[in-house]
Amino acid sequence: MKLFLKTKDFSVSGETFELFKDEELDMLVTRPQPENLSKYYESEDYISHTDAEKSLMDKMYQVVKRKNLKNKIQLIENQSNNPKSLLDIGAGTGDFLLFAKSRGFEVVGVEPNEKARQRSSQKGIALHQEIQNIIDQKFDTITLWHVLEHLPNLDDQIKTIASLLKDDGVLVIAVPNFKSYDASYYGKYWAAYDVPRHLWHFSKTSIAKLFDAHGMEVTAIKPMWFDAFYVSMLSEKYKGNKLYLINAFFVGLWSNVKALSTKEHSSLIYILKKKNQLV
C-alpha cells in the first residue's frame, strides 16, 4: 500500500495519522490504528454520543438529524418487503430506533459507548453494548449509519453482520466517500477522514468487493445531500477559517452539483441484499 496523505485528529487528540491506499480494494486505511480507541471518543464535541445543542453547528446537526429520521425509515420501507425487525448497529443515543419503534418496527440496537447508551435508555430504548449479545437473532433490516468506518477487524465484522440478516433481508450502510469533490478540495483537512475514529475510508468499489466476499450485493446507492455542507463546515473550522459558514456553503453546494454527473457524493447510502435472493 502507498501513502495517500497525512492528516491529524482535529477534534480530540491532535495526533498525526497516515492514510494508505489499498489499490486492489480502492479504499484508504488509517495507520496506526490505536489499540485503545475509546479515549478518542471522549469528548463533549462528539455529537452522536451527546445530543449536544450548544453551538450553531450542533443545532443545525440536530435539526437535520430529526428531518433525516423520516427519510431513513421511508428508504427502508421502500427497499424491503414488509420489514418488521430492525437492528441498528452503532445506535448512538437511540433517536433513530425511537422513531422506528413509533412506526411499528421491532427494534434492537448496539452501541459500545456507555454515555450514549445511558442517554438512549432515558428515552426508553435499551441498547446492547456489543453485537455478540444478539448473535443468535435474525433481522429483516440491519442499518449502520456512519458506523462501518469505525469498526475494527472489518472482514470479521462484515461476516457477523451478514449472519444476522435474514435471507430476504436488507442491509443499509451509510459511509463517507473519499472520492467526493469536498474530499479532494479539503485534502488533509477533510473532516470525514476523522482519524483515528475512522479506520477505513470507502469507495463504491471497496464496498462492493468487501461485501461480495460474504455473499452480498449492492442493489442501490443513494446520496446524502446534507453531508457535503456539514462536512465542509467542519473542514473549514479545522482550517481556522472564521467565515466557515459562507465558504462551506459554496463548497458543499459545488460538491453536490459535481456529484450530479460523477455520482461521487460526500456520503453515500448503500442498499445490499444476499445474492441468493437476487436470482
Image (cartoon, rainbow, N blue to C red):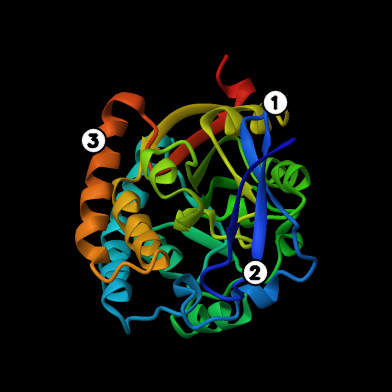
Residue at (31, 32) in percent of width and height:
259
At 69% across and 53% down in the image, what residue appears? 137
Q: Quadrant of residue 51?
A: bottom left
In primary-sequence order, the first of circles 1 and 2 is 2
Q: Quadrant of the N terminus?
A: top right
Query: In front: 44, or 13?
Result: 13
Q: Say if mark 3 contacts mark 1, CB within 8 Å.
A: no
- Which one is in front in this view, the residue at disc 2 or the one at disc 3? 2
* Residue where numbered disc 2 is placed: 15
Q: Residue at x 58, y 23 (%)?
A: 277
- Which numbered marker is on residue 257? 3
* Residue placed most toward the observer, 197 or 183: 183
- Is residue 175 shown above or below 64? above
Is 85 or 195 nearer to us in this picture? 195
Give above or below for 232 relative to 220.
below
Give how far apart the Cα atoms at labels 1 and 2 are: 28 Å
Quick one: label 2 or label 3, which is nearer the N terminus? 2
Query: Which label belongs to residue 24?
Result: 1
Q: Where on the picture, by quarter, is residue 88? A: bottom right
Residue 237 in percent (x, y) is at 36, 67
Look at label 1 and name its amino acid. Glu
Tag 1–tag 2 contact (CB < 8 Å): no
Residue 241 in the image, given as x and y percentages of width and height:
31, 67
The quadrant holding residue 102 is bottom left
**Number of on-image labels:** 3
Q: Amino acid at mark 3?
A: Val
The image shows residue 114 at horizontal and vertical percentages of: 63, 80
Task: State the SS at label 1.
Answer: loop
Cα distance, mark 3 to mark 1? 29 Å
Mark 2 burial class by Cα count in 10 Å: few <14, some 14-19, many 20+? few
